Amino acid sequence: MTTLHGKKVFITGASSGIGASTALKVAAQGALPVLLARRYDQLKNIALNIEEQTGVQSLFYSVDVSDEGQVKHVFEKIEKEIGFCDILVNNAGFGVFEHVKDSSLENIRSMFEVNVFGLIACTQAVLPHMLEANRGHIINVVSQAGKLATPKSSGYAASKHAALGFTNSLRLELSDTNINVSTVNFGPVDTNFFSHADPSGSYVKNVKRWMLTSEQASEAIVRVMMKQNREVNLPRWMGIGAKLYQLAPHLFEKVAGNAFKMK
C-alpha cells in the first residue's frame, strides 16, 4: 500500500459527483487535487469546499476534454505551474440511453469524443512525463457497460468497450515500467449522470435499490490509488455477472434477459 501524502492527483469530471467526491477524499489524505472540468464556477465551489473541510488549496482548471487543443494547452499550463502529475484519474464521461433506431450519430460521436478520445488525450498529455520519470498511476473510470452491454445503450456501451480496450492495451505497453494502469468499472451510480442519460427517470427508478453512491465510488477509486489494483468492479455481483456472460453469453442472455431491459 502506498501513501497519497504530497501526491498531485489530476481528476477530470471533477465538478460534481464521483470526481468531486474523489477530490475531497484525496485532499483528506494529504494529496493535492487538481480539478478539471468544463464548468469553472462549479470547480471553484468544489475547491472552496475542499479547503473548508481539509485546509488543502486545490487547483482547478476549466477544460473540455473532447477538445484536443484545450487538453494540450491546459495540461502544459499545469505542468509549468506545479510540475509532475503523480496520478491521473480519467473520470469525465457521459451517456445517452437510446435505441439504435432512435440514435443520432451526433450523440454517439459526442460520447466517443468525451468517453474515449478525451480519456486518450488526457493520458497522452501526462504519459511522456511519467515515462521520463518512470513512475505514475493512470486510473480510468470506465463502466460495467464496457463488459456487459444492454439494450438502449449501444452508443454508450460501445464507447466504454473502447475505453476498456485502450486501458488494457496501455497496461501491457507499460508493463516494463513503474507506471501503473488501473480500471474502475462501476454499475449505476447515483449522480446527475442520469439527468442527461435518462431524462424520463425510468431507469433510475428500476435500479435505485442497486445504485452505488458517489461516496462508495470515490472510496473505491482512492483504494485503487493506495493499493494500485489492476482492476476493480463494483458492485461485485455485477462484475461476476460480466464474467459469466463472457463464459456463456447465450445462456446468460436466456436466463437474465429481462434484467437487461431496465432502461
Image (tube, rainbow, N blue to C red):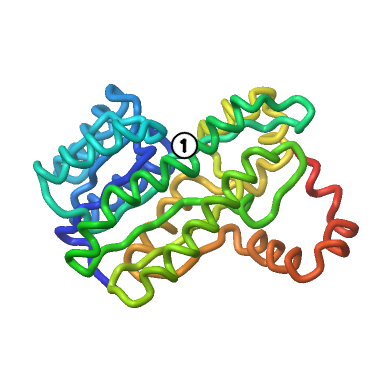
Q: Residue at x 66, y 41 (%)?
A: 208
82 on left or right of 153: left
- In the rendering, at what x and y percent does residue 87 appear? 28, 57
Residue sitting at the far bottom: 176
155 on left or right of 247: left
SS state under label 1: helix
Q: Residue at x 19, y 46 (%)?
A: 54
Residue sitting at the far left: 81
How many marks overall?
A: 1
- In the rendering, at what x and y percent does residue 153 appear? 69, 39
Question: From the viewer's perspective, is residue 103 above or below residue 160?
Answer: above
Q: Name the image quarter holding residue 165.
A: bottom right
Q: Which residue in the structure is indicated by mark 1?
A: 114
* Near-viewer residue (216 or 112): 112
Q: Residue at x 15, y 46 (%)?
A: 79
Q: Residue at x 66, y 63 (%)?
A: 237
* Near-viewer residue (30 or 239): 239
Q: Amino acid at mark 1?
A: Val
- In the rendering, at what x and y percent does residue 7 appear? 19, 58
> Which quadrant: the N terminus?
bottom left
Question: From the viewer's perspective, is residue 120 above or below residue 35?
Answer: below
